[in-house]
Amino acid sequence: MAKTTGTAAELIPEEPTLERLRFAAADCKACDLWARATQTVFGEGDEKASVMLVGEQPGDAEDIEGKPFVGPAGRILDRALQEAGIDRRQAYVTNAVKHFNWSETRGKKRIHKKPNARQMAACKPWLEAEIQLLRPTVIVLLGATAAQQLLGPGFSIMKNRGKLIQNSLAQHVIATVHPSSILRAPDDESRQSAMAAFIADLGKVTPLLKVKKSPVAAAR
Ligand code: URA
Ligand code: SF4
């Protein structure tokens, strides 16, 4: 296996902008995932966004297109955001890990594999740099990988979903399920109720976004 440095920390530019971060991340080889993926899929969206949505890692479609949440899980996310009254164009969307990880194929599709602890730790500086730069009012953690990346390995989505979490990362942090869990629901009825619960969790974010960042807080 190719030799890796084990952390992206040394690649973070001294005076980061979103463009500089994206440019630096494109060449990241801090963990082994770069070798089997097409490209780094960096976060995307409005630099002034007050909400940041964090997923797990790019999937098959994202790996090819180079943008986060553009495949089937992205379509679920888009629908849920719309129903919750959040405009995706005003959000910044990113992932806990920036390269696609896959181990087997089903037909033409490569099946995603959860990143391991080493890969997550290597990639974390990119997400931390995005948070520091954007200083979103609200961070929404989509699924266990995103939540554990920022809140530690003991964090349970099932116990804490939809609750506002006290944390220094942002004024408000909230965790919910990953949209792909809705795609995996065994039947229509459970899919509908999983979607309704996901929309209800996201709906808790909507009123938090109506309060504008104060000029003092924004200049910090
Ligand atoms: N799943 C994720 O967690 N992120 C994406 O960008 C796509 C699918
Ligand atoms: Fe770097 Fe993250 Fe890609 Fe690993 S997954 S090579 S740490 S960008």
Image (cartoon, grey):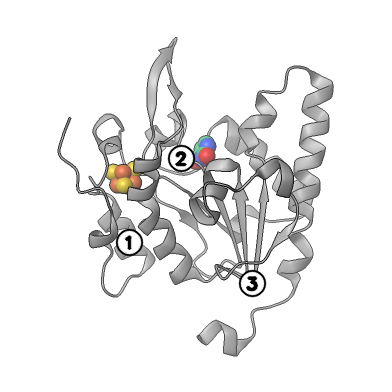
Whether residue 42 is visible to the viewer of this picture, yes or no, is: yes
Q: Quadrant of residue 143?
A: top right
Q: Earlier in the sequence, mark 1 or mark 2?
A: 1
Q: Position of residue 52 (x, y in %)?
A: 57, 59
Left or right position of 157 against 200: left
Q: For the residue carrying disc 1, how many other residues have a C-alpha within 10 Å: few (<14), some (14-19), or many (20+)?
A: many
Q: Position of residue 97 (x, y in %)?
A: 41, 45
Residue type marked 1: Leu
Kindly tell me whether mark 2's CB lies below 8 Å from ligand 1.
yes
Task: State how far apart marks 1 and 2 are (Cα).
Answer: 17 Å
Q: Is residue 73 above or below residue 118?
A: above
Q: Tell me the element at label 2.
A: loop
Left or right position of 93 against 175: left
Task: State how far apart marks 3 and 1 are (Cα).
Answer: 23 Å
Task: Residue under label 3, please give it.
Answer: 171
Q: Tell me the element at label 3.
A: loop
Q: Residue furthest left?
A: 3
